[in-house]
Structure formats: structure tokens, C-alpha cells
Image (tube, rainbow, N blue to C red):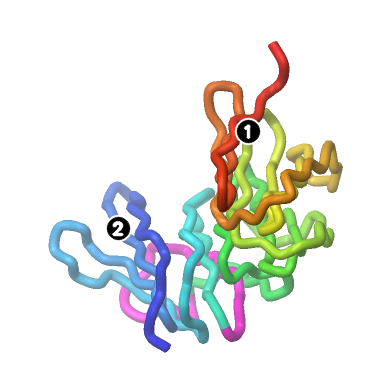
């Protein structure tokens, strides 16, 4: 089971660039000029889909299928730093497919089974965790002070951004969708199996 689909991430640590690549059993940081490995963290998991994110000096990754976890890693080590550079880890509510979202110091997650969480990205403290219902492949997005969670049946749950769970709306398209939504030009764009929707307030 040595396959993964995560998008690489370019970060800068202490003035030097690193390319982060998540894979089965391991996340690696490499020098983008030479390809030389800088550090690695090992874990149990495969088919890693979520993209990594970097915030507050921590690299946030999901470890994929079998035993999904979210790891926060300090990316300033050398060699195998599995035992020394994991700042915190989260197992409950970890996603297999949806990517994490960081807004300020809030880390938003949604599991494939529809459990959403808001976590302090600096400490790993869970601020809230709620079941939204449905199954999820799409990643959450932030726009206009709200966080949007789109499930596979086309239902979007809109939450107010913040440390408390506050649902603003729940909107249904009743069409299957696996793609993440996008926001821009004052509108929300959702691609279902059949259509691309532009959704916005009336002028």
C-alpha cells in the first residue's frame, strides 16, 4: 500500500526553503534545490490525500488511511525526528480525504464520516467538535468570516468562524459532489457531478 496523493508544500523555515511531501508511512522535507532530505517523520498510514498546511511555525499533516491522525510537526530538525519534533497529535475526528484549514489560530477539520472540529493550531486543544452528518471528501474553506463544509450529497453547512460552534445555515443542492468548493468575486462556486454552480446574495 505504498501510494499517496497529497500535494507538496513549499515552506520557509529560518530563511531556508523546504519542500514538504506526505506519503505512505512518512512525511519528508527536502531541499528544493538539491532534493536532499532534511528531515522525516514516520507514521502508520497510506493513501495520504489531504494537503499539508503550515501555520504558527508548525506543519500540520494528516496521515491517511488505516489509523488516521493529525500531526503538528516542528520543521526545524535533521534526520529522523519522529520522537523529538511532534508538537501534538490528534486522533479523534482526523480526516482521510478532506484537507485541514487554518484561519488565524483556528484549525478546522472534518472527518470523512462528518465529524467537524475546531482546534487551537498552536497547542492541539480541541475547542469544539460536532457531528455535521453525511460523508465528506471536500475540504472546508473560509470566506467572509464563515467556514463552509460541503458533504458528498451536496449539503453545505455554514459555520461562523470562531472558537464556539455556531451554525449559520445549511443549504442543500441534492446532487453528489466530491470536489471542494471555491470562493471569489463575492460568490461561492460548487461543482457537482452534473453542474457548476455560482451562488451569491441577490444584488
Q: Position of residue 137 (x, y in %)?
A: 60, 61
- The circle on residue 26 is none
Above or below, 2 against 167 in this view is below
Quadrant of residue 162 within the rendered picture: top right
Kindly state the secondary structure of the residue where label 2 is placed. strand
Residue count near mark 1 (Cα–Cα under 10 Å), binned few <14, some 14–19, many ≥20: some
- The circle on residue 18 is 2
Please state which of residues 128 and 7 is positioned toward the viewer in this rendering: 7
Position of residue 170 in the picture relative to residue 88 (left or right): right
Position of residue 46 in the picture relative to residue 158 (left or right): left
Q: Position of residue 69 (x, y in %)?
A: 61, 75
Above or below, 76 against 144 in this view is below
C-alpha separation, residue under disc 1 versus residue under disc 2 = 28 Å
Quadrant of residue 5 within the rendered picture: bottom left
Q: Are marks 1 and 2 in contact (CB under 8 Å)?
A: no
Q: Where is mark 1, residue-wise? A: 143
Extreme-top residue of the structure: 203
Location of the C terminus (image quadrant): top right
User: What predominant SS class does the magenta segment belong to?
Assistant: loop
Q: Residue at x 28, y 69 (%)?
A: 38
Q: Magenta stretch: give its range.
A: 66-84
Q: Position of residue 194 (x, y in %)?
A: 56, 48
Above or below, 39 against 10 in this view is below
The verdict on residue 157 being magenta is no
Q: Residue at x 65, y 56 (%)?
A: 176
Please state which of residues 143 and 157 is positioned toward the viewer in this rendering: 157
Mark closest to the chain's N terminus, 1 or 2 = 2
Position of residue 17 in the picture relative to residue 105 (left or right): left
Q: Residue at x 85, y 42 (%)?
A: 167
The verdict on residue 83 being magenta is yes
Amino acid at each position: 500500500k505504498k501510494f499517496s496523493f497529497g500535494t507538496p508544500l513549499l515552506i520557509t523555515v529560518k530563511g531556508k526553503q523546504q519542500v514538504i511531501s506526505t506519503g505512505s508511512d512518512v512525511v519528508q522535507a527536502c531541499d528544493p534545490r538539491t532534493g536532499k532530505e532534511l528531515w522525516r517523520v514516520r507514521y502508520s498510514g497510506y493513501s495520504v490525500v489531504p494537503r499539508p498546511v503550515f501555520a504558527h511555525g508548525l506543519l500540520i499533516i494528516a496521515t491517511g488511511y488505516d489509523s488516521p491522525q493529525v500531526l503538528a510537526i516542528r520543521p526545524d530538525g535533521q534526520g529522523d525526528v519522529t520522537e523529538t519534533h511532534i508538537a501534538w497529535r490528534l486522533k479523534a475526528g482526523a480526516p482521510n480525504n478532506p484537507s485541514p484549514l487554518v484561519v488565524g489560530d483556528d484549525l478546522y477539520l472534518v472527518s470523512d464520516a462528518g465529524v467537524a472540529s475546531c482546534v487551537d493550531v498552536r497547542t492541539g486543544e480541541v475547542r469544539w467538535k460536532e457531528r455535521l452528518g453525511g460523508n465528506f471528501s471536500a475540504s472546508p474553506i473560509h470566506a467572509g468570516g464563515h467556514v463552509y463544509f460541503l458533504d458528498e450529497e451536496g449539503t453545505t453547512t455554514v459555520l461562523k468562524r470562531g472558537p464556539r460552534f455556531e451554525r449559520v445555515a445549511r443549504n442543500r443542492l441534492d446532487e453528489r459532489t466530491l470536489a471542494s468548493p471555491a470562493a471569489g468575486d463575492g460568490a461561492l462556486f460548487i461543482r457537482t457531478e452534473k453542474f457548476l454552480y455560482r451562488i451569491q446574495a441577490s444584488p
